[in-house]
Image (cartoon, helix red, strand yellow):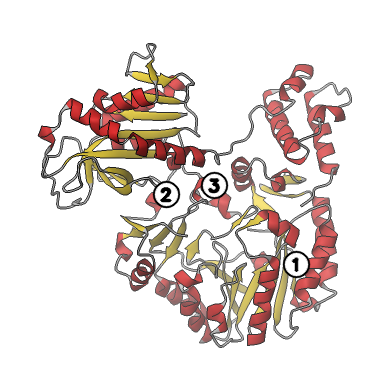
Amino acid sequence: MIKTIYIEKQVANHPRTREILARFPDTTQIYCERYGEIFNRKAQSFRLQKKQPALILAKKHKGFVLPAPEAYSIGAKENYYFSHMMNCLYDCRYCFLQGMYRSAHYVLFVNYEDFANEIKNKIQKTDKEIHFFSGYDCDSLALEPVTKFLEYFLPVFRKYRKALLEIRTKSTQIRTLLNTEPFENCVLAWSFTPAEIAAVLEHKTPSVDRRIISIIKLQEKGWRIGLRFDPLIYSSEYQSQYRKLFADTLQICNPELLHSVTLGSFRLPKGYFKSLQKMYPDERLFASPLEEANGMFSYKAQIQSEMLNFCREEILNYIPEEKFFPCHNAI
Amino acid sequence: MIHLICALKCEAKSLIAHFRLKNCSDSTSFPLYVSQDKQISLTISGVGKINAAAATAFTHAFLQTSKQDIWLNVGIAGHKDLEIGEVIIAHKIIEQSSQQSWYPQILYSPPCQSMEVLSCDRPASNYSDTIFSDAVFEMEAAGFYATACRFATSELIHVVKIISDNQQHPADKISTPFVADLLKDKLEIIDQLIASLRQLAKDMDSPNESPDYYDQIIEQWRFTHIERNRLKSCLNRWHVLYPDENPMKVLDGSLQGKDVINQITNKLDTLPVYY
C-alpha cells in the first residue's frame, strides 16, 4: 500500500502523473526537484524502506534503452533492455537491486513516450532481429494497475514484428494481457525457484502455483511463454526440488507457445554481496558455500557446475535444445 | 538510544521531567540530560541551525551514538493558520538561505500530520511567504537533520514541531511558561512517535561484531587483524547455519589462526544447507 508519493515538479502536469495521483487521493504527495534528492541520498536503509516504500514519479532524461549483456541473449545478436521503473514490489533476498540502490522506494519514469521513441530508433536502425528486455530493474507486471506499462508498450511492439519484447516477471497481474490480443513478438517470461526456496527467499511474491496458473491462462489466450530458472539456488535437496519444479512448469507448457527456457546461476558483484550480507546478517543464502572470483560472489565452482549440469539434463528431457539458453553469468 | 535536540530550555523542560532525565555534569559545551538507563538523551542546542548542528554533532561525539539510534528535533514553530498546539512532523525540510531540501522518511503511521518545514535564519514575521505559503516556519530543523544524517540512518531521524504562533497569535506574544505548557500537552504524541520509531529500529540488523565463541578462540590462537575479521565473518556464518553447535569442536589443535579459519570454513562447506 503506497502512502507517500514524491513528484518531480517537471512531471507534475504529465497526464500519467495526474492519473496516478488521482488513483491515490489519500497519499501524502510531496514535490521535489529531482528524484535523486530522495533516492540517491546517503544514510538510507534499504531494509527499513522496504517495509513501507514510497512511489517517486520522475522523468528519465537519457539512457532510455541500454545494451543487454551478451550472456542474456535468447537467440538474437542485438539485445537491449529498458527500465521504466527502478525497484520492485517484491522482496527477493537474492535480488541485486538491494545492493545496487540505496533506497527501496519505487521510481517510476512517467515519460514512456521517450522510451518508445528510443526503441523505435533502435529498431529502424537495424536489419537484424532485435530483442528488448523489460524487467531487469523492476518487475514488469507487479505494479501494472498503477503504471499501465503494458497498456502503453504492447501496442508499440505490436507494430514491429522483427523486434521481440521479453517481459520478465513473477507477478500474477495478468488482467491486461488477458484482455489483449496476443502477438508473435512478445514473450512473457516467468522466473522460478522451487516452492520451498521461494517461500523462504522470495518475500511478497505470488506462490509458484499461482504463477503457473497465470501461465496456463495466458497460454490458453495464445501468449508465448518463457521460463527463467534464474538464479539457481543451492540446497542439499536441490535435485529433488528442481526436478519437481521442472516437471510442474515444463509439463504444463504448450510446446508451440514455449518460446525459451533459460538457466542462470546465483551471482552478485562483491560490493552488492557485502551490502546484502550486512543488511541481512541472519540470511541463510549468504551463509551458503559461496566464493569470490573476479569480483563476483557465486556458489563454489564444483557446486555451480553440478547444479547447472543437473538442471540442463533435466530441462532437456522436456524441451528441444534450440529453445534452451543456459547459464547467464553476468548481471 | 533516543536523542532529543531542543533549542530552548522551556521546550526541553517537560521532556526532561517526562523521561526523568538527569543533568550530565560532564557536558560543558551544551546542557545535556540523560536517563538513568542511558536510553534517552536530551541536548539543549540554543536557537538557530548552526547551534542545532553543533549540538547534534556534540551529542554524537559525547555519547558515541550508533547508526541504529533515533534522533528527534522537538520544538516550537509558526504557521499562517494552523491552530496553536497543533503537532506536525516534517516530510520535507527546506533551508531558506540555500533552498536545499531534505526529505525525512516516514515509514510508519505518524501520530500527527506531516508537513513542509522551512528553516529560516531569522525569526519569521511574515506568515504569508508567497513561495512556501503552507510551510511551517522554524530555525533549527535543517541544521539538525543534515548533521544527524551523518550519524544515523535517515528513517530514524525526525523533526517534530508544535505550533506556537500564527497570524492570529503572532510570535511576539509567546512566553516561556506558554511554550513549556505547549510541550507538556503534547507528550503523548511524542511518546507515540518514539514507540513507532523504536519498533522500526528493531529491524536495523547489523553484523554481530562479537559472535559467539570469538573471544574464546582468539584467546587460544593467534590471529592477525585481517584474520580476526575473517574469523568474525566465519563465526557469523556458523551462527546462521548451526546456531546450536559449538564450532570449537571441529578444531583439532591447529597452531595458526588461519588454520582455525580454514577448519571452520571447510566444515561449514561440507555441512548440508536446507530450505
Numbered disc 1: secondary structure: loop
Which of the 4 image quarters holds residue B192? top left
Quadrant in which the C terminus of chain A appears: bottom right
Q: Marks 1 and 2, Cα distance to the nearest angstrom? A: 46 Å
The lab-note entry on whether marks 3 and 1 share a chain reads yes
Instruction: Check contact, mark 1 vs mark 2: CB within 8 A.
Output: no
For marks 1 and 2, give the one nearer the viewer.
2
Percent coordinates x, y for residue B67 in the rendering: 49, 33
Q: In this view, does B13 lie above or below A80?
A: above
Percent coordinates x, y for residue B94 in the rendering: 27, 45
Q: In this view, does B273 lie above or below A17?
A: above
Front in this rendered view, residue A7 or B274: B274
Which of the 4 image quarters holds residue A274? top right
Look at label 2 and name its amino acid: Ser
Q: Mark 1 points at which residue?
A: A326
Disc sitting over residue B124 in the figure: none
Q: Name the residue under label 3.
A: A47
Residue beneath the point at 24% across and 25% down: B10
Look at label 1 and name its amino acid: Pro
Q: Marks 3 and 2, Cα distance to the nearest angstrom? A: 18 Å
**10 Å crowding of disc 1: few (<14), some (14-19), many (20+):** many
Instruction: Check contact, mark 3 vs mark 2: CB within 8 A.
Output: no
For marks 3 and 2, give the one nearer the viewer.
2
Q: Earlier in the sequence, mark 3 or mark 1?
A: 3
Give the letter of the chain under mark 2: B
Disc sitting over residue B109 in the figure: 2
Look at label 3 and name its amino acid: Arg
